[in-house]
Image: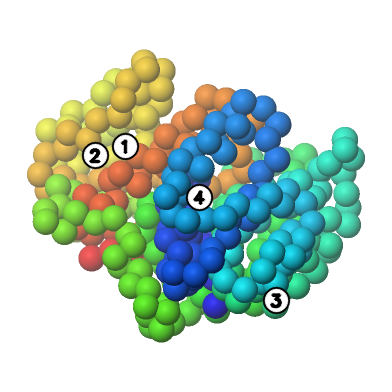
């Protein structure tokens, strides 16, 4: 089986990919294709956390920062392989030795076609870096265009494609029955507090997609019921609804606070998803985006319903 997971920062895609790879291996050999080439202490910390996350899972690590088809020399492609991530791998291929390789996208697409063809099971992880409201320099736009082409080709050759949002899965291609054929029950791999939900509904979407209006209309809320969260102060967690809760994390970062989840039982949350797009250059913006991804992943298991809003149209992710 070939499987592709796409999602924003800290959306749970890497963790789920690890579980899926172990499941596909059927207690056989499973390999982690490590693609990151560390360039600073921040990269080293990311690697340390990834190692910690998969410790005890039996992965054999193969370093492949470039030329990914070299992994086929390990056991001839038999077993289950996890490539995390296409994003880092393409960055290494395109930018190396102080040069920009304009042929990198074509070469890596060819490499991925070969890898997909010759591996027994392959799980691939890719970041959603395409939802930005800013303009980029030509190099960044070329990178996004190349990565998109690679990701689209991998999706076309995959049996299953899953989009991750706040640890919720949307099957863009394939279905749960295909995983069940390999004795994988994906619902058992997604954290969920089935013994009791504190959040009645969590509504996620991009900026100005109608999250607040949706909650107001569905639950007949007044402004007295709502806390409009800001980056200047801690929210009133006693309110029925918390709108723009991601702003609270800016407050936490500025004041070195651990984000709270002291919601009233049955609360409603409207959330602007800031986890996608190109990795910010500013360290504070990177820290905010990663904190937002982790926090959203903490909220999701506590939500009875999760709804994604796009252009005012609600789509149920959970519940």
Q: Residue at x 70, y 77 (%)?
A: 117
Q: Secondary structure at mark 1?
A: loop
Give the residue at mark 2. Answer: 242
Give the residue at mark 4. Answer: 8
Q: Is residue 281 visible?
A: yes
Q: Residue at x 11, y 56 (%)?
A: 195
In 3D space, how far apart are the residues under numbered discs 2 and 3 (Cα atoms)? Answer: 49 Å
In 3D space, how far apart are the residues under numbered discs 4 and 1 (Cα atoms)? Answer: 18 Å
Q: Nearer the viewer, mark 3 or mark 1?
A: 3
Q: Is residue 7 visible?
A: no
In 3D space, how far apart are the residues under numbered discs 4 and 3 (Cα atoms)? Answer: 28 Å
Q: Which tag, 3 or 1, sits closer to the chain's start?
A: 3
Residue 179, percent across and down?
Answer: 42, 77
Q: Nearer the viewer, residue 154 or 32?
A: 32
Q: Which tag, 2 or 3, sits closer to the chain's start?
A: 3
Q: Is residue 48 left or right of residue 145?
A: left
The answer to whether the residue labelled 1 contacts the one labelled 2, judged by CB atoms less than 8 Å apart, is yes
Q: Which tag, 4 or 3, sits closer to the chain's start?
A: 4
The quadrant of the rendering that contains the C terminus is bottom left
Give the residue at mark 3. Answer: 118
Q: Secondary structure at mark 3?
A: helix
Q: Which tag, 2 or 4, sits closer to the chain's start?
A: 4
Q: Is residue 121 left or right of residue 154?
A: left
In 3D space, how far apart are the residues under numbered discs 3 and 1 (Cα atoms)? Answer: 45 Å
């Amino acid at each position: 089986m070939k499987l592709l997971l796409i999602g924003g920062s800290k959306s749970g895609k890497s963790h789920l990919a690890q579980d899926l790879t172990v499941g596909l291996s059927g207690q056989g050999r499973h390999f982690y294709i490590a693609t990151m080439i560390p360039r600073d202490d921040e990269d080293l910390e990311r690697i340390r956390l990834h190692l910690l996350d998969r410790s005890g899972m039996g992965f054999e690590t193969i370093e492949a920062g470039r030329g990914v088809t070299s992994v086929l020399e390990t056991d001839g492609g038999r077993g289950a392989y996890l490539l995390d991530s296409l994003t880092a791998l393409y960055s290494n291929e395109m930018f190396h030795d102080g040069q920009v390789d304009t042929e990198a996208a074509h070469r890596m697409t060819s490499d991925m076609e070969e890898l997909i063809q010759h591996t027994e099971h392959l799980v691939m992880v890719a970041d959603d870096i395409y939802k930005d409201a800013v303009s980029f320099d030509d190099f960044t736009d070329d990178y996004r265009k190349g990565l998109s082409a690679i990701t689209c080709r991998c999706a076309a050759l995959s049996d299953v494609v899953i989009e991750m949002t706040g640890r919720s899965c949307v099957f863009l291609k394939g279905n749960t029955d295909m995983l069940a054929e390999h004795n994988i029950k994906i619902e058992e791999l997604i954290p969920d507090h089935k013994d009791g939900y504190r959040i009645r509904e969590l509504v996620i979407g991009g900026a100005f997609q109608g999250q607040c209006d949706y909650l107001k209309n569905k639950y007949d809320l007044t402004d007295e019921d709502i806390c409009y969260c800001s980056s200047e102060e801690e929210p009133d967690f006693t309110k029925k609804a918390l709108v723009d809760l991601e702003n609270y994390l800016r407050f936490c970062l500025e004041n070195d606070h651990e984000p709270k989840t002291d919601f009233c039982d049955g609360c409603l949350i409207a959330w602007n998803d800031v986890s996608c797009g190109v990795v910010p250059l500013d360290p504070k913006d990177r820290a905010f985006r990663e904190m937002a991804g982790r926090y959203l992943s903490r909220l999701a298991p506590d939500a009875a319903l999760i709804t994604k809003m796009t252009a005012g149209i609600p789509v149920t992710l959970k519940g």
